[in-house]
Amino acid sequence: MNKKERTLVLIKPDAVQRTLIGEIIQRFERIGLKLVAMKMMVASGDHIEKHYTLDSQWRKNVGEKTIKSYKEKGQSPPSEDPIEISQPVLDGLVKFMSSGPLIAIVWEGAHAVKIVRKLVGGTEPLSSDVGTIRGDYVLDSYEMADSDNRSIRNLVHASGSVEEAEMEVNHWFLPNEIISYRLVQDEILYDVNLDGILE
């Protein structure tokens, strides 16, 4: 069991503009995750594109989902080539994610990747559960995003797997920007006997 698993969270430009930074960070802190790195920046389009394509299968996977979505709606996709159809999706993400300041954060703790994904909710805010960040704070939907020809505004990016988290953390942070330190709550969460509490 890795009690120091790390994951990346990006508080997207829409969340920054809606002044939800504190609310979002509080969700992760309250569950017991430790913030070990954070920076605010306006990311370049190139940096955003590299972020989404760190996984060599990302474009293929996104393209296949997009084609499937068209067909489920009874529509013909503009292309049957997943790579080709993923380009407008990637272009939209680059435009959205580089449109203003965002905050990159590394969270640490047991099951960090799964815990963060659970707290964030599904990609589409409309269908995300109440109690999740996206379900509680956003009313956007695929339908609205599609009709406006833009990326969905869903406040937060969260790494999808431990392997993805490692790649993403390394993409956004240098090793010396990630801080190892002790919190008192570490004793409560991880000390087997709680014998490190009393003096």
Image: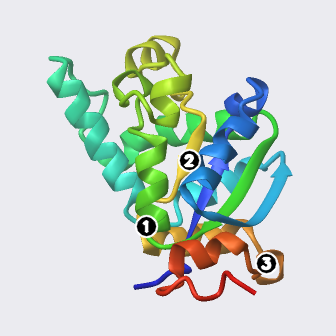
| The label number, if any, that marks residue 88 in the structure image | none
Mark before the other along the chain sequence, 3 or 1: 1
- The front one of 87 and 11 is 11
Image x and y of residue 196, in percent: 65, 87
Q: In this view, does 175 lie to the left or right of 135?
A: right
Image x and y of residue 183, in percent: 73, 74
Mark 1 highlights which residue? 56
Mark 3 highlights which residue? 179
Quick check: 116 above or below 161? Answer: above
Tag 1: amino acid: Ser
Mark before the other along the chain sequence, 1 or 2: 1
Q: In this view, does 122 lie to the left or right of 188?
A: left
Q: Do the residues labelled 1 and 2 touch (CB within 8 Å)?
A: no
| The label number, if any, that marks residue 157 in the structure image | 2
Q: Which of marks 3 and 1 is in front?
A: 3
Mark 3 surroundings within 10 Å by alpha-carbon count, few (fewer than 14), some (14 through 19), many (20 or more): few
Secondary structure beneath label 3: loop
**Residue 81 appears in the picture as rendered:** no
Q: Distance between the residues labelled 3 and 1?
A: 29 Å
- The front one of 52 and 115 is 115
